[in-house]
């Protein structure tokens, strides 16, 4: 029972059977206390401050403990929930808030967003927030006592576990575990980590999955540790009987577990997961006195750990460090609503940091220069003014530096001051030390116009055109799987264009991506022309293969035949299945179909005035016009329909690159292997960025007419 006349006494409730657990996870001397025994602390691990408050909801079961904790920590106590917070705060503008969520909480994600929103509505921002909670009131006393006990200086070591290859990051004093380690070693070292433990992995509320060299490592929230390969209620464990990390057996006093729902403490589905099985409760049952996790599903990334590590090196307490994670997620477009939560007293000091180098900043007329004298795992710098982060958010910041392919750079606003934070992460050869590493200097320069991220439209159209051709029997074999390959490249380039994870040389990168896009869009043009030329040796009419797919809209405007100059009609077609496919077929009463072209900015025609022919030779020129405002690569081929094989000296194929608004001609020479003696069609095929078209004219090859 809590005695009303002992406001400065914080209880520690445990049974005799739990003494061993208290000795290992809280304090060995406190584990020896007799019932109602006391131990006085000469000093507390947290410094009291009137700007730091304790917050608890009215009528909550943890209210008596929150009141006692506030008194011991010399903090004002505010009794309110999100709905009544504004009135309860009065004129206070707290620097930090140590929050007691309800022990019966079933929707911590919703409660966190509501609480932050209430603070923002009252103060304009959410202050640094730390949560203190547990499975039971008794276990909550364990966590509260751990906040007050002095720190052990030997806790300064740091272990970093993620799914990246450790060879891709610089060596430093911190221990790094990744995909090039094996299960047994990872389990041993995570259990043995005695300082700060940073983990980035896939997770569910009751277990995490860290994939390493020889399989997945389980991070188990169950008190049993999944013994015998059994999970909740005896169900089969995903990891079988393989070694795993048992969260409640961790030795690390500080744990950041960056995965989905690693800060979840309860749910509304009574048939689903018991509270005791959740990794958050398991970690707080261990020797951990502080924990950072995510209250819900989240688009987490290893860079979240880097930002937190950088913040620690800059002196940000963990309750403020999680705000750097949130700011980084917002800046990179991964999250908007809060998801990261710190468990611990909001006034706890910054975590020890290793593997971080702080840069020097020089502001000049052209922008800013950030220089790091030596490389480490994480490079960070503070630049005065939020304008740099605002420029980055508006795509108006150019960041340049040495070896751009080996450094990742991000810029975010400092949530706690009028500053911008620059993070640089060396990778690859630039990260491995030696003569090629050394110092690093980045230049930040404002841009007058935003960087253009509008990529993918060209390749998107190409995917549609190629997919349409794939459906035609004539091209089904030569283009098998082509549209899927292009679509995969489209996804990749748009991921690059939309990503805000790396700002270094972004404009130059996107210029290169644009060139890659155009090359990808044209990848199958040559194969299309080659197939058309081969098929034209025999009887082949591609219109027959797709005529049934098209919906015709005859034009009300007369056309002119390019071959003979006579009256011609144009019919616009749309595809019933692919609405983005539009074609125009032009027909002449004398020459037949003289053009079957996709609706695009390219035009092709056979110049009739230059055409000469005989039974053994056809020569002439094809004119190609680009009415687009950008260059186009065009593959061209000329064939005699049903003309058979051509002699090797023939010139039937070319590729041209046309500037926007320009035209070019291709001089062809077709030498049939066998003389031609009938009425045939001369066809000029065009392929550009997956679009396929044909222009044609008719020729009567008279017997015995030899050139």
Image (cartoon, rainbow, N blue to C red):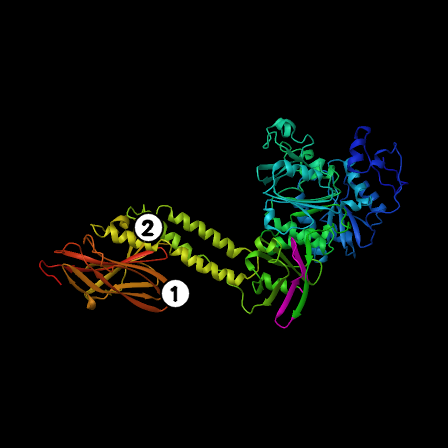
Q: Position of residue 596 (x, y in %)?
A: 27, 57
- Mark 2 and mark 1 lie on one chain; the one further toward the N terminus is 2
Crowdedness of circle 2 by 10 Å Cα count: few (<14), some, many (20+)? many
Is 98 situated above or below 404? above
Where residue 191 sits, quadrant-wise, is: top right
Q: Is residue 541 left or right of residue 321?
A: left
Quick check: is 580 in the magenta stretch? no
Q: Position of residue 51 (x, y in %)?
A: 80, 55
Where residue 10 sits, quadrant-wise, is: top right
Secondary element type, mark 2: helix
Tag count in the figure?
2
Q: Is residue 612 left or right of residue 519?
A: left
Q: Is residue 423 left or right of residue 513?
A: right
Crowdedness of circle 1 by 10 Å Cα count: few (<14), some, many (20+)? some
Residue 620 visible somewhere in the drawing: yes
Which residue is at 28% across, 63% downward? 604
Looking at the image, which is closer to me, 186 or 485? Answer: 186
Instruction: State the extent of the magenta-drawn residues as a range.
Output: 364-385
Where residue 26 sits, quadrant-wise, is: top right
Q: Please tell me the numbered disc located at residue 469.
A: 2
Residue 588 visible somewhere in the drawing: no
Q: Position of residue 416 (x, y in %)?
A: 71, 58
What is the magenta segment's predominant secondary structure?
A: strand
Q: Please tell me the numbered disc located at residue 134.
A: none
Which residue is at 57% across, 53% downward? 428
Mark-to-mark CA distance, 2 and 1: 23 Å
Q: Nearer the viewer, mark 2 or mark 1?
A: 1
Is 640 situated above or below 26? below
Look at the numbered discs 2 and 1 and tell me whether their residues touch, using CB distance below 8 Å: no
Q: Quadrant of the C terminus?
A: bottom left
Query: What residue is disc 1 on?
Result: 631
Q: Position of residue 1 (x, y in %)?
A: 85, 35
């Amino acid at each position: 029972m809590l005695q009303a006349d002992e406001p400065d006494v914080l209880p520690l409730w445990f049974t005799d059977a739990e003494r061993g657990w208290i000795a290992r996870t809280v304090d060995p001397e406190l584990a020896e206390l007799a019932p109602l025994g006391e131990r006085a602390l000469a000093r507390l691990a947290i410094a009291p401050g009137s700007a730091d408050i304790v917050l608890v909801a009215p009528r909550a079961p943890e209210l008596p403990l929150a009141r006692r904790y506030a008194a011991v920590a010399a903090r004002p106590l505010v009794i309110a929930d999100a709905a009544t917070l504004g009135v309860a705060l009065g004129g206070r503008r707290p620097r930090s808030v140590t929050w007691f969520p309800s022990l019966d909480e079933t929707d911590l994600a919703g409660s966190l967003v509501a609480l932050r929103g209430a603070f923002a509505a009252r103060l304009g921002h959410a202050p640094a927030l730390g949560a203190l909670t547990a499975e039971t009131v008794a276990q909550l006393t364990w966590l509260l006592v751990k906040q007050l006990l002095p720190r052990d200086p030997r806790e300064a070591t740091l272990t970093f576990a993620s799914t990246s290859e450790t060879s891709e990051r610089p060596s430093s004093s911190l221990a790094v575990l990744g995909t090039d380690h094996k299960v047994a070693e990872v389990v041993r070292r995570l259990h043995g980590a005695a300082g700060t433990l940073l983990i980035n992995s896939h997770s569910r509320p009751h277990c995490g999955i860290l994939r390493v060299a020889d399989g997945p490592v389980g991070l188990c929230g169950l008190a049993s540790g999944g013994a015998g390969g059994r999970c909740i209620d005896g169900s089969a464990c995903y990891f079988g009987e393989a070694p795993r990390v048992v969260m409640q057996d961790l030795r690390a006093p500080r744990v950041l577990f960056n995965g989905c729902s690693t800060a979840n403490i309860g749910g509304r589905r009574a048939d689903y997961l018991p509270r005791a099985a959740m990794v958050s409760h398991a970690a707080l049952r261990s020797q951990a006195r502080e924990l950072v996790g995510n209250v819900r599903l989240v688009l987490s990334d290893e860079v979240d750990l880097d930002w937190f590590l950088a913040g620690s090196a800059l002196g940000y307490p963990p309750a403020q460090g999680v705000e750097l994670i949130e700011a980084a997620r917002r800046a990179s477009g991964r999250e908007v609503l809060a998801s990261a939560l710190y468990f611990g007293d909001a006034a706890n000091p910054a975590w020890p940091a290793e593997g971080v180098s702080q840069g020097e900043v020089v502001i000049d007329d052209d922008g800013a220069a950030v220089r790091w004298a030596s490389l480490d795992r994480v490079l960070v710098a503070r630049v005065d003014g939020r304008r740099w982060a605002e420029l980055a958010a508006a795509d108006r910041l150019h960041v340049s530096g040495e070896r751009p392919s080996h450094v990742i750079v991000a810029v975010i606003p400092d949530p706690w001051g009028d500053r911008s934070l620059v993070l640089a992460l060396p990778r690859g050869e630039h990260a491995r030390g030696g003569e090629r590493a050394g110092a690093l200097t980045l230049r930040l320069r404002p841009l007058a116009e935003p960087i253009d991220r509008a990529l993918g439209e060209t390749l998107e159209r190409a995917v549609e055109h190629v997919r349409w051709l794939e459906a035609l029997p004539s091209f089904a074999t030569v283009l098998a799987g082509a549209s899927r390959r292009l679509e995969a490249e489209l996804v990749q380039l748009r991921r690059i264009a939309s990503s805000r994870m790396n700002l270094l040389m972004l404009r130059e990168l996107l210029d290169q991506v644009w060139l890659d896009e155009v090359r990808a869009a044209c990848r199958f043009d040559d194969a299309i022309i080659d197939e058309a030329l081969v098929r034209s040796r025999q009887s082949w009419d591609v219109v027959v293969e797709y005529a049934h797919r098209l919906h015709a809209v005859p034009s009300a405007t007369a056309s002119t035949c390019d071959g003979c100059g006579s009256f011609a009609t144009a019919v616009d077609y749309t595809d019933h299945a692919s609405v983005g496919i539009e074609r125009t077929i032009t027909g002449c009463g004398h020459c037949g179909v003289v053009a079957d072209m996709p609706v695009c900015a390219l035009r092709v025609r056979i110049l009739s005035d230059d055409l000469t022919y005989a039974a053994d030779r056809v020569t002439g020129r094809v004119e190609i016009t680009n009415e687009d405002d950008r260059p186009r690569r065009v593959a061209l081929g000329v064939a005699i329909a049903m003309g058979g094989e051509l002699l090797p000296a023939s010139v039937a194929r070319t590729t041209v690159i046309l500037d926007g608004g320009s035209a070019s001609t291709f001089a062809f020479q077709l030498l049939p292997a066998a003389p031609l003696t009938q009425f045939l069609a001369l066809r000029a095929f065009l392929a550009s960025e997956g679009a396929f078209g044909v222009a044609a004219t008719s020729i009567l090859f008279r017997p015995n007419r030899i050139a």
